[in-house]
Structures are given as structure tokens and as C-alpha cells.
Image (cartoon, grey):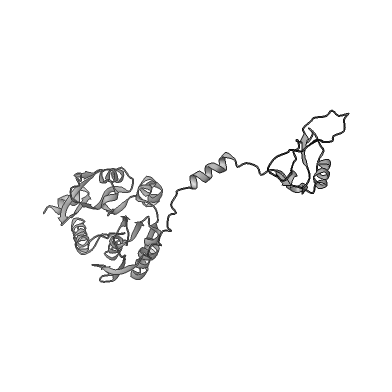
């Protein structure tokens, strides 16, 4: 640092004296002659601690020449570390993403209804939009008519247990209870659909006491089928109405065919899209019917005795 002073030029000579010599600075006084007048300058330099003057002597010397010791003896600012520089580089040039707009709340409406049985014509809730695609009423009505005729009881379903996979609104399982089933297991993975659609529909129809809801993925349910079957054995009816684009029907039907969920007298109702090949059998069950409703197809598997009743 340079300080303007009225004194002559003082140049300290840097010298490392031994321990026996006093630690005092040496100065040379010089006077330069020049044609152009220049202000006299004091140039002061000092060495590191332990290699020259002690800290107290430095302060005294600086104060003697009217200088601020804190300004000269303060520790220099440590250099920025490489990590900090790297973080600064990463932050440059990045655009700040605007916050995502909150999704609108999901809503419901009453477009579905129970077609037959003791809860006939009762309206059912369903989600607005395409999050959940319930079975069309014309397909549902045809499926139950075929089941009742194939089981030898055209007026109603024979009593039994129903498993409603991909239940969604619960429309199929509720129809089954209304037409004579004694108990229905609903498998639906969406908690909002369960709490705001399925459960209210069961309460509204009065079927909550004979219903069991499993909030789990169908794949996980099938993997743990043995613990769900329990002492009651296999189911009498199984409905499979998955979202078309989210399942592999070959894998899904393979899981069901090898599952303890089906028995020798089980009926399986499967809704599937066009351009999907369905096998003629599902385990030891045979295909009873395969019908088309526009772009929707319906296949029903059942025991061989039901196929013989269906043919006449």
C-alpha cells in the first residue's frame, strides 16, 4: 500500500536477523532530484510472523507513521474453493422453471344405474373424464343375462361369491349383489376412486355390509391370491374389466388361469378391445360365448356343463 506523506522517502531493508539481534527494521533515506516535483512516498513492507518484527512492534511502527495497524495487519480474505466456483458455474445460464399449476379437483356425476335385481334403477356415481372407464350398460346387461342362462337360473344369479377385478365404480359387483350374489370382493388401486366413488355407491345401494374392498393393484392381488381365498375357497364369479392400454391380456389371463381364485365351477367375464386374441380356454374352463359390441368385446369362460346348457 502506498501512503502520501511530507517526509522523505523511507525504504525499509528486508533483513532476517538472528535471535541474538534485536528485531528492528532498517531504513535507508534517499532523496531523488528531479526536474518535475513529486510528492514524497513512504513504502512500508514487512515479513511474516517469526521472520522479522513481532506483531506488537509492527503495530507500534505503523502507529508511529500515522497508519492504521488493523488495515495492514488484518488477515486476507481466503480464496474461493473450487467447489464453490463449480457450484457458481452450474447455476449460471439455468432458466428458472415456473411452478406447476395445481390440477383441478376430480369430480363425479351420476350416469350409471343398476339394471336388475333389488337395487334396480338406483343411480351410481362415476368419475368425470376418462380416468375410470366403467363397463357399458349394454355390455353389462348382456353379460348378466348370459351368466344367468348358463347357470340354469334365468331369473337371477345362483348365490355365490364374486371377485370384481379393476372394479372402479363398482358397477359390475353391485349388479352382482343386486341379482343374488352373497358377497363381492372389489379390487381397485386408486384410493380416491375407493373413497369418493366406490364406497359411496355401496352405501347408497345398501351393499356395504356384504362387500370387501381391496385397495391394491390387481397384479399384487393375484400374486397373493392364496391369502385372499382363505377358507372360503375359490370364487364363483370373476369379472375382469381392465383399462385396455395398460394391461397385457396374455399375461393377465395366464395369471388368472393358474390362480387358486378359480375353481371347476367358476365363471369368468372378460371385457377386451378389438384386435386382441383371446384363448378358447382359461385353465380348465372353456369359452361359453364371445360377443362384440362395437369396439368392445365380451368373452365368458365357464365349466363344460354350462357350455352344454348354453348351446340349446
Q: Position of residue 82 (x, y in %)?
A: 57, 39
Residue 62 against residue 163 in the figure, above or below: above
Question: Is residue 10 toward the left or the right of residue 218 in the image?
Answer: right
- Snapshot quadrant of residue 159: bottom left
Q: Position of residue 207 (x, y in %)?
A: 35, 66
Q: Position of residue 77 (x, y in %)?
A: 66, 44
Taking depth in this image into account, of 257 and 24 the one nearest to the observer is: 24
- Snapshot quadrant of residue 177: bottom left
Q: Position of residue 51 (x, y in %)?
A: 78, 32
Count of labels shown? 0
Question: Is residue 280 toward the left or the right of residue 14 in the image?
Answer: left
In the rendered image, is residue 207 in sight? no
Taking depth in this image into account, of 45 and 178 the one nearest to the observer is: 45
Image quarter in which the C terminus is found: bottom left
Residue 137 against residue 83 in the figure, above or below: below
In the rendered image, is residue 212 in sight? yes
Taking depth in this image into account, of 205 and 156 the one nearest to the observer is: 205
Outermost left residue: 312
Query: Residue visible at 83% across and 44% down?
Result: 60
- Snapshot quadrant of residue 84: top right
Image quarter in which the N terminus is found: top right
Amino acid at each position: 500500500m502506498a501512503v502520501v506523506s511530507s517526509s522523505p522517502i523511507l525504504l525499509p531493508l528486508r533483513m532476517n536477523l538472528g535471535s541474538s539481534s534485536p528485531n528492528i527494521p532498517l531504513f535507508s533515506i534517499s532523496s531523488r532530484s528531479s526536474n518535475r516535483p513529486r510528492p514524497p512516498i513512504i513504502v512500508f513492507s514487512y515479513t511474516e510472523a517469526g521472520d522479522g518484527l513481532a506483531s506488537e512492534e509492527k503495530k507500534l511502527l505503523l502507529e508511529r507513521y500515522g497508519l492504521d495497524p488493523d488495515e495492514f495487519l488484518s488477515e486476507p480474505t481466503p480464496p474461493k474453493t473450487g467447489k464453490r466456483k463449480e457450484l457458481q458455474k452450474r447455476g449460471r445460464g439455468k432458466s428458472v422453471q415456473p411452478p406447476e399449476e395445481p390440477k383441478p379437483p376430480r369430480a363425479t356425476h351420476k350416469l350409471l344405474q343398476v339394471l336388475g335385481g333389488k337395487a334396480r334403477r338406483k343411480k351410481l356415481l362415476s368419475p368425470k373424464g376418462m380416468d375410470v372407464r366403467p363397463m357399458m350398460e349394454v355390455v353389462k346387461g348382456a353379460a348378466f343375462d348370459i351368466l344367468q342362462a348358463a347357470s340354469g337360473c334365468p331369473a337371477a344369479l345362483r348365490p355365490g361369491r364374486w371377485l370384481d377385478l379393476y372394479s372402479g365404480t363398482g358397477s359390475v359387483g353391485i349388479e352382482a349383489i343386486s341379482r343374488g350374489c352373497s358377497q363381492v370382493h372389489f379390487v381397485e388401486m386408486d384410493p380416491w376412486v375407493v373413497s369418493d366413488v366406490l364406497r359411496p355407491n355401496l352405501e347408497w345401494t345398501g351393499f356395504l355390509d356384504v362387500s370387501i374392498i381391496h385397495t391394491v393393484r390387481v397384479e399384487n392381488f393375484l400374486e397373493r391370491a392364496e391369502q385372499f381365498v382363505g377358507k372360503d375357497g375359490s370364487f364363483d364369479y370373476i369379472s375382469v374389466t381392465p383399462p385396455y392400454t395398460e394391461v397385457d391380456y396374455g399375461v393377465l389371463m395366464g395369471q388368472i388361469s393358474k390362480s387358486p381364485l378359480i375353481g371347476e365351477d367358476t365363471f369368468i367375464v372378460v371385457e377386451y378391445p378389438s384386435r386382441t386374441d383371446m384363448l378358447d380356454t382359461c385353465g380348465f374352463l372353456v369359452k361359453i360365448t364371445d360377443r362384440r359390441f362395437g369396439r368392445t368385446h365380451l368373452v365368458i369362460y365357464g365349466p363344460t356343463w354350462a357350455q352344454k346348457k348354453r348351446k340349446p
